[in-house]
Image (cartoon, rainbow, N blue to C red):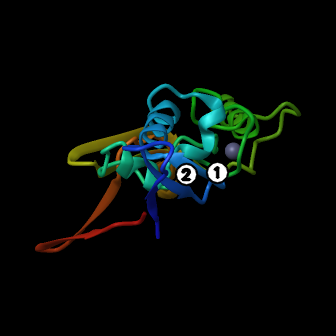
Amino acid sequence: MVQYSEMPELPGVVMFKCERLRATLAVSSCANMWRGGNRDGIERLERCKACPVGAVHAGETAASMSPMMGQCICARCHRGATRLVGKHLCVSCYNRQREFLVGANSKGTAPTKVGQLTRRRIRYLSGPDPISLTLDHSRDTMELVVTALRDSKKRVTFAFHSQAQLTQQRLF
Ligand SMILES: [Zn+2]
C-alpha cells in the first residue's frame, strides 16, 4: 500500500514512500521517472519501468505490468542477455538459428540442439489494440508469448478460443 503525505516545508507537493527506490519522492517526480524509463528509455531509470505505482502516477493505467516488459530477455531461451540480436535473440540462440538455417553447424554435422524452428502466429491485446504477431522462426508458442510480454508497452491480454465462446486470461 502506498501512503501519501505532505511536508510542511513543501506545501502542495504530495510525497510518498517509494518501496522500489527506498526513497521519499514527490508524486510528480515519480511520474516523470516512470515516463523517462518507459518512453525515453533512460537506463538509470530501469527500476521505474514496469512499476505499477509509477504507471498510476503517470496516468497510464493501461500500462504493461509485466516484469518482463522492456527487459533484455531472449524470447527463445528466456535468459537475460547483455544484448539481443535483432532485439529478439541472445547471441547463442541466434548462432544456433543461423546453423539451423544453413543446415549444418560449424563441424559440418546436422544441428540437433535447436530443434525445429517454424513459423508461428499468436493474437493478443496490447491495451485495447488487437495485435497479430508472426515469427518466421520460433521454437515454441512460448517464444511468441515472451516476445509480446517483453515488447508491448501496454498490458498484454492473451485470448484463447474454445468452440463457441472466447475466454480471456490475463497473465500479468
Ligand atoms: Zn537465447
Badge 2 density bin: few <14, some 14–19, many ≥20, Cα 10 Å: many
Q: Is residue 125 left or right of residue 76?
A: left
* Residue 60 drawn at (x, y percent): 32, 45
* Residue 107 drawn at (x, y percent): 89, 34
Amino acid at dot 2 = Met
Amino acid at dot 1 = Leu
Q: Which residue is mark 1?
A: 21
Give whichever of 172, 89 is nearer the camera: 172
Question: Can you say which quadrant of the picture contains the C terminus?
Answer: bottom left
Quadrant assignment, res 90: top right
Q: Which residue is mark 2?
A: 68
Residue at position x 44%, y 55% from top?
A: 53
Residue at position x 30%, y 51% from top?
A: 61
Mark 2 residue element: loop
Residue at position x 51%, y 36% from top?
A: 33
Q: Is residue 160 left or right of residue 108?
A: left
Q: Is residue 146 left or right of residue 148?
A: right
Badge 1 density bin: few <14, some 14–19, many ≥20, Cα 10 Å: few
* Residue 138 drawn at (x, y percent): 53, 45
